[in-house]
Amino acid sequence: MAIAINGTDYSLPDDPRVSLLDLLRERIGLTGTKLGCNQGACGACTVILDGERVLSCLTLAVQADGRAVTTIEGLSKQGDMHPLQRAFIEHDGLQCGYCTPGQICSAVAMLGEMRRGDPSYVTADLVAGLGSTTREEIRERMSGNLCRCGAHHGIVEAIEEQLVGDAA
Amino acid sequence: MTPFDYRRAADQTEALSLAAAGHCRFLGGGTNLVDLMRQNIEAPAALVDVSRLPATIDVTSEGGLIIGATARNSAVAAHPVVRAQYPMLSRALLAGASAQIRNMATVGGNLMQRTRCSYFYDAAGSRCNKREPGAGCDAIDGLSRNHAILGTSEHCIATLPSDMCVALAALDAIVHLDGPMGPRSVPLLDFHQLPGTTPHIETVLRPGELITAIAISPSAAAANSRYRKVRDRSSYAFALVSVAAGLDVADGRIRDVRIALGGVAAKPWRAVQAEDVLRGEAPTRENFLRAADVELAAAKPTEANAFKIELAKRTMAAVLGDLTGAGA
Amino acid sequence: MSKLQNAIVGGVRTAMGYVPSSWLPGGTRDPLIDKRVTLGTQQSRVDGPDKVQGVARFAAEVRMDGLVYAACVHSTIARGKITELDLAAAEAAPGVVLVMTHRNAPKLALPPPIGMTNLKAAGNNILPIMQDADIRWNGQTVALVLAETQEQANHAASLIVVRYEQAAARTRFEDAKADATTPDSLMIERNRLKRGDTDAAFRNAAGSVDAVYRTPWHNHNPIEPNAATIAWQGDRLIVHDATQMLNGTAGSLAKVFGIKDTQVFVSSPFVGGAFGGKALWDHQILGAAASKLAGRPVRIALSRASMHRLIGGRSQTEQRVALAADATGKLKALLHQGFSVKPPHSVCDEAFTLSGRSLYESESYDIVQHTLDLDLLANTFMRAPGEAVGTFAIESAMDELAHDLGIDPIALRLRNIGDTDPVSGAPHSQSDLRLAYELGAKKFGWDRRAATPKSRQDGEWLIGMGCATGSFPYVRMPGMSARITIDSNGHATVSSAAHEMGMGTATVQRQHAADRLGLPLDYVTVRIGDTDLPFGSFAGGSSQTASLGAAINAASAKLAGDLLRLAGNDTPLAGLRANEIEFANHGLRKIDEPSRYESFASILERASRSEISAMGESGAPLEILKFSMHSRSAIFCELRVSEVTGEVRVTRLVGAFDCGRILNPKTATSQFRGGMIMGLGMALTEETLLDKRNGRIMSASMTDYHVPVHLDVPEIDVLWTDIPDPRTPMGARGIGEIGIAGVAAAIANAVFNATGKRIRDLPLTPDKLLSD
């Protein structure tokens, strides 16, 4: 009965009301994951659960029993930032920094979705799937992560750079 | 959030036996239920977590699909058969919520989504007949721009927010259930209830009953289908109006047509009257608009949501028009 | 404000007219305008690594031993009295430490209101807090629960039953107009401006427009909710807050709790978005009061719903604009009148009538605005208060007039901008809106715009282009101070109780200090974000860069003199006066004889000092009384409107800004875009929904209040004139707010160009475009 968070096992909370978000922030002290709306409307609390992006505010911690969670703190390896973290700085894909960890976790998992060809609402041909990646595709797929400062351009550019890296 | 017991079911049998204890809710992705519990709108004594029951998507020999209730919305949307043979379902799912929520939300849970009426959500400060039968409805004379125009009652004008259900309604999906009185199947069109005098009763689900799967059958209209969602912002918003439609035209005549509307009623609104008008007719814009007029004739809007009538008509005609010209 | 204030400001302005510019702040051109090394270059944020790795610490993330969590219970009526409070179930609920209501709350003084004369004030909602049974707005906190966990606190709060005796409440904008009041002044300007004969102008006009524009309530909705982690250490109050008013919050809490300013420590190193919504509201006071009662540290992190009930937003406005012009487009009359809400407990005039009269010369003016008193939570400042909504009205009207006259909308505007301030006649410190329009029009391709509405179409999508002017005044706050410390390695630390809400405060001021002190960037550290640092004024009115810039400049001058004295006679600098030396290459040198030089490290070593510090302060901003100082923008929009659904999709925005020198193009571009994106939200989707029947906010979530999502945000090009303002530190003017101004009008004007439909009522939602 444990959750593997960034490779370390943590025991489940006694109170099943505790969300994965509150477990991370208030009980384990991993405050990189942010609380924005606490009702699934902003994306600030996005974490990666068994490889897929989810909202930790709407996930009861007990539901993550036996599963692997990666948070923003888990993306840096031995102090080395994830390429996307570096790209966010380079492209200024942040201002206040509060939505940033959620944007980055969301984008890391989103890159996986795009690489395996999952369609989005704006994908023109569902059968053919993704053609060349457009900014519109990135924007639609990232629309679950709100940013109030308006750092959208830097975010999209930073993500796009990773996809261009793929093609090269 | 009121304290509750949490149990995870290892299989369907265990789920049903855990639920037999009473006053429990099944937990799928939790994307709606956890929020409703946090808002003190739902307070079950126990949650039976069914989210780890097998999430299968099986293709039948006829090309139909049996989608396990715990299949994630994202998995269904990305399934190659759904994309090729039921594009309106794939698009409807992709139009819903955000990628994160689609990764969490189950098909069964999507069916059980509750309204986003802001008076329903304001448990502390507003009256709602859904939350508290007989309390009254603050929405009817209140801020009702997002509310229903069809199938309303004097007790409730809430809408069902699901996109997926709109496509499933057009596809004549069958909902498979299992419960204390054994398994049964219900057409999706009969699954959700109009408010009438009992707006708190939203589905035909019986106590302890579990949604186990959704079945859809192939058709030419399903393969040539679309979903269009009209909303205030371009993504991550509930529908003002949405249209799922499939069209099969042969020899210049409409052989089969399926139309359902979202954002207009407490259930996915199958446009039966419009379909009747269109079947056997030529697929022209005039006919599409005429059919839309017939379907929306019974609409009873408030001052704030009267625009939905015109919006629904135009969107319906536009989607059908697109289907006439396009492959998928 | 008052008649007295008008008289004082008027008198000072008159006097300033006679004072030579050189005597005033900004009288001497800042040498950094011409000698930039790192200023003007692209620099990534110094706090970027902390933010992208989730290490930057926000207010609700401070760990404390014995911390308890707060949850609020809000009133559900707008006016009346609490008659019954049933707390038994809550008090008995697991984990509950305290239930605080008006029955047991400590005595709390009113918070001092935010104002221009008291920098130790940050109060927004000047009402007694939990001091009596009175209910004054729908959403007021009637009980606060503390419990061991947030889940326990929230649950216990839901168990509290409150009964009320309801009184008649005033919650309807329309009804309140009959009792509107007319303030004498708005900020430091007179409210009424009546000049010339507007009636005659309309009679003789070749073209005219007379229309009413409406903007709804807005909420800031930063992604970080308002939150504070609070503890008492004896009689010392520790507040880890999310605030753009550090010292104001400390001073206000001191007054509320009857202690000295120095007994309050406020820390806010990172703020997760503010936009005007992060100053002192009830929650910090309630949290501190409850902490005192419980004897435990408290975390009060507002839920998104509580935010909507406790943090005020931008007032609804109704604005009439009437313009009359001759056949060439020269304005003969400019009339701008209307209403906004400002209850007596609010501190914010939504001064929407100031931008038009600062922009356009007219033969006659008739300008005045009125305020309405409603039983609502106080309204407050939100990004470009006044200008954001004011430019929507005036710039929509200018577009209507251009259409009426058959004149290009840009030409109409340029015909009417003044060489001096249109009302006072004061000279501009720097102003080149014309160049902004030229740059923007070229980048945007304005020449491809069809003058006739509804003439471009792509399938169901009607395509249109529009433009509008944005405007925001220059503000520099007095009292902002900074300390520069240079250590024995020659490393400089600049410290000030300044704020970082995403603007890049430390990043840009590090560039500033490096250039000012003749140091490379990595020799400078900037420390901001708590009240142990030198006194900071608020981060508002786009003033912080200028205010802190002035403080650092003053500190550097003091430091130069101190270093010179410390250097003594045994130095190449011996005998020089302060005005003969400059900072360069890690030290000081004679301006016209660079070989007379000594490094900081050498001066300190010889004096056996480990460091030297100097303080400086931003002085009285008299320059804004002598000069007309405004930033301007030319905003361009291209968009598509669905003929089927009425959906508006903006495809391109261009903003050309005349804001003085740009200090860091990378962060500045982000800030301009950020403002423009908030303008996009204001234009298309944002609206706080107030149920008129009971004053309850029904859009108290991010599901119901639609801020733009990624897919809403189009390509946005940002350009600037980069002409230095010779009256400001570094030649720069603030850029935090100008971005939003004009955007909603540019979008509404483009919608008209696309569809022929003029929507005067924000937001531009599909329902409004569907109707014929």
Image (cartoon, rainbow, N blue to C red):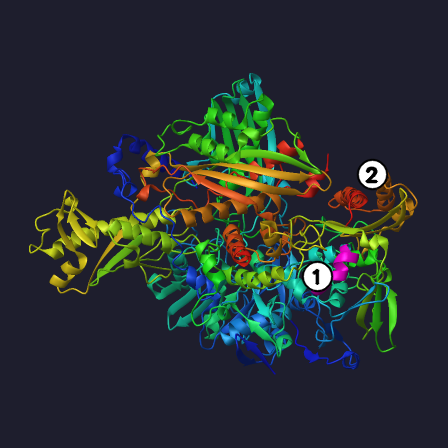
Q: Residue at x 84, y 43 (%)?
A: B292
Q: In this rendering, would B292 be left or right of C131?
A: right
The reply to whether dot 1 and dot 2 touch (C-beta < 8 Å) is: no
Q: Residue at x 60, y 23 (%)?
A: C404
Q: Quadrant of residue C28?
A: top left
Query: Label 2 is placed on what type of residue?
Result: Arg
The answer for how far apart the CA atoms under marks 1 and 2 are is 32 Å
Q: Are the numbered discs 1 and 2 placed on the same chain, yes or no?
A: yes
How packed mark 2 is, by other alpha carbons closer than 10 Å (few <14, some 14-19, many 20 or more), is some
- Residue B77 part of the magenta segment: yes
Determine whether the residue tagged by mark 1 lies in a helix, strand or loop: helix
- Front position among marks 1 and 2: 1
Please identify the dominant SS of the magenta region.
helix
Q: Estimate the x, y position of residue C330 in percent, counting from the top left.
A: 49, 21
Above or below — where is C656 with respect to B141? above
Examine the rendering and report whether any part of residue C194 can be seen: yes
Disc 2 chain ID: B
Q: Estimate the x, y position of residue C612 in percent, counting from the top left.
A: 20, 60
Determine whether the residue tagged by mark 2 lies in a helix, strand or loop: helix
Examine the rendering and report whether any part of residue B158 can be seen: no
Query: Label 1 is placed on what type of residue?
Result: Ala
How packed mark 1 is, by other alpha carbons closer than 10 Å (few <14, some 14-19, many 20 or more), is many
Q: Residue at x 42, y 31 (%)?
A: C435
- Residue C169 part of the magenta segment: no
Q: Out of C105 and C520, give the one closest to the viewer.
A: C520
Q: Residue at x 32, y 52 (%)?
A: C511
Q: Which residue is mark 2?
A: B285
The magenta stretch is B75-87
Disc 1 chain ID: B
Q: Out of A90 and C679, give the one closest to the viewer.
A: A90
Q: In this rendering, would C28 be left or right of C104?
A: left
Q: Estimate the x, y position of residue B81 in percent, counting from the top left.
A: 77, 61
